Amino acid sequence: MALWSLKGKKILIIDDFQEMRFMLKTMLEPLAPDLIKLAQNGEEAIECMEKDKFDIVYCDYNLGKGKDGQQILEEARHRELLPYSAIYMMATAENTSSMVMGVIDYLPDDYISKPFNRSVIHARLKKQLEKKQNIDDISQAISVNNYKKAIQLCDDLLASKPANRMDLLKIKGEQLTNLNEYEKAADLYENIIEERDIP
């Protein structure tokens, strides 16, 4: 069976352990990405993102001294070093992702628990790429700061009651916040919380 491909994609791997960086590079090379860059800390990671626009960023949460994986994500998003269409995957020790998910402005697209193997990372990346492709028009609108259009596109998709409804509601809430429509955003988030609490 033919492998799906990462052709045309640029990948950044951030991990403080050299063995992990090279192991992950070896896992992803068969998918033929255009570029794989390696960084061992937050400073190197931000430098890489200043020079290149990456489609996929894998980052360990705990990088030792300096910035952690969440702080790198927040700086990259705040400084617009990471396109909205990019996938940011955060690796954590087993069962610590809930600890990471505090009250924060930017959430990773996915968490992956260590240890993992090639088939797990491939499956998770494929799933995230499919999710991003489904909202490609929305990502393009956000990338040019057309937040009203992004909200309209979310509403158009939400009308068909899609499987990714929660993702679309979250995106809509983010864009309402970008437009300083804080009251509408708060109402939307309250509705999301109520829906999640329904057994």
Image (spheres, grey):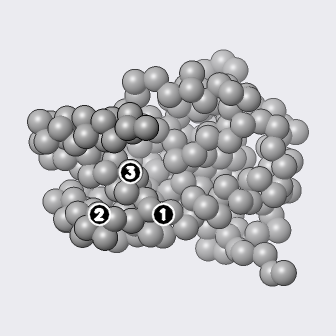
Rounded to the nearest angstrom, the CA distance separating label 3 from label 1 is: 14 Å
Work out whether mark 1 precedes mark 2 in sequence or the reverse, and give the earlier one.
Answer: 1
Q: Residue furthest front?
A: 199
Question: Which is closer to the viewer, label 1 or label 2?
Answer: 2
Query: Which class describes the residues within 10 Å of circle 1: few (<14), some (14-19), or many (20+)?
Result: some
Q: Which residue is mark 3?
A: 166
> In the drawing, does residue 195 fall left or right of residue 3?
left
The residue at 67%/70% (across/down) is 6
> In the drawing, does residue 66 fall left or right of residue 83?
right
Rounded to the nearest angstrom, the CA distance separating label 1 from label 2 is: 16 Å
Instruction: Compare residues 97 and 48 and report the one nearer the observer.
Output: 97
Question: Mark 2: which amino acid?
Answer: Leu
Instruction: Compare residues 143 and 111 and report the one nearer the observer.
Output: 111
Rounded to the nearest angstrom, the CA distance separating label 2 from label 3 is: 9 Å
Instruction: Compare residues 75 and 44 and report the one nearer the observer.
Output: 75
Q: Which residue is mark 1?
A: 132
Question: Mark 3: which amino acid?
Answer: Met
**x then y, percent, for residue 198:** 37, 38
Work out whether mark 3 precedes mark 1 in sequence or the reverse, and give the earlier one.
Answer: 1
The answer to whether the residue labelled 2 contacts the one labelled 3, judged by CB atoms less than 8 Å apart, is: no
> In the drawing, does residue 180 fall left or right of residue 22?
left
The residue tagged with tag 3: helix, strand or loop?
Answer: helix
Question: Mark 1: which amino acid?
Answer: Lys
Q: Quadrant of the N terminus?
A: bottom right
Q: Which residue is mark 2?
A: 158
**x then y, percent, for residue 172:** 26, 52
Instruction: Compare residues 131 and 108 and report the one nearer the observer.
Output: 131
The residue at 61%/61% (across/down) is 127
**x then y, percent, for residue 187:** 17, 38
Q: Does 160 appear above or below 46?
A: below
